[in-house]
Image: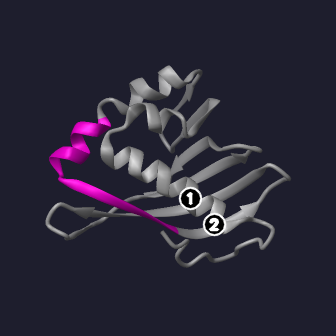
Amino acid sequence: MSPGTAVGVDTSTDLDTLAGFFDRYGAAITAGDVPGIADCFASPAMVVADAYSFAFSSPAAVALSFVGAAPDYAQRRIVASHARFHRVQQVSAALVAVEVEWEYLDAYGRSVPGQRFHYLLRLGRDAVRICTVTPLD
């Protein structure tokens, strides 16, 4: 996956690292790989939306929240995903804010509209993890 168009990119952010992370996260989501999805989140982590917020206190809590998403992707025959970066901002030495638009491909090769999200990521020595997710659509 190429990072796509990244507007407002802070050059100290390694786009290849972010692209690799979102490749792994997107592949886990489209495959219904719940342990793989959970591995992409920090503990604790949060989802913050206009009408609700909730926290994940453990990888098991993340996994439970995504169990229901896997059948939805399968029903829509989503087989691939691509994260297109709109904004990337280095917040601190270890934190990066990324606005992503997800693009999906179904089993027939058709483009399926995705959603936009704002992610706050922690860049560790050996892994990138999601700290917060905010749906933008």
Residue 9 vertical placement versus 42 (above, below): below
Residue at 52 percent across and 62 percent down: it is 100
Circle 2 SS class: helix
Q: Amino acid at mark 1?
A: Gly
Q: Does the rendering let one see residue 113?
A: yes
Residue identified by numbered label 1? 20
Q: Does the rendering let one see residue 52?
A: no
Nearer-the-camera pick, 103 or 47: 103
- Magenta span: 69-84
Using residue 106 as the reference point, say whether residue 60 is left or right of it.
right
Task: State the separation of the CA atoms marked 1 and 2.
Answer: 6 Å
Question: Residue 49 — which label?
Answer: none
Whether 4 is among the magenta residues is no
Residue identified by numbered label 2? 16
Residue at 69 percent across and 75 percent down: it is 8
Nearer-the-camera pick, 38 or 57: 38
Residue 48 location, quadrant: top right
In what quadrant of the picture does the C terminus appear? bottom left
Q: Position of residue 73 (x, y in %)?
A: 25, 47
Residue 132 location, quadrant: top right
**Is the Cβ of the residue at disc 1 closer than 8 Å to that at disc 2?**
yes
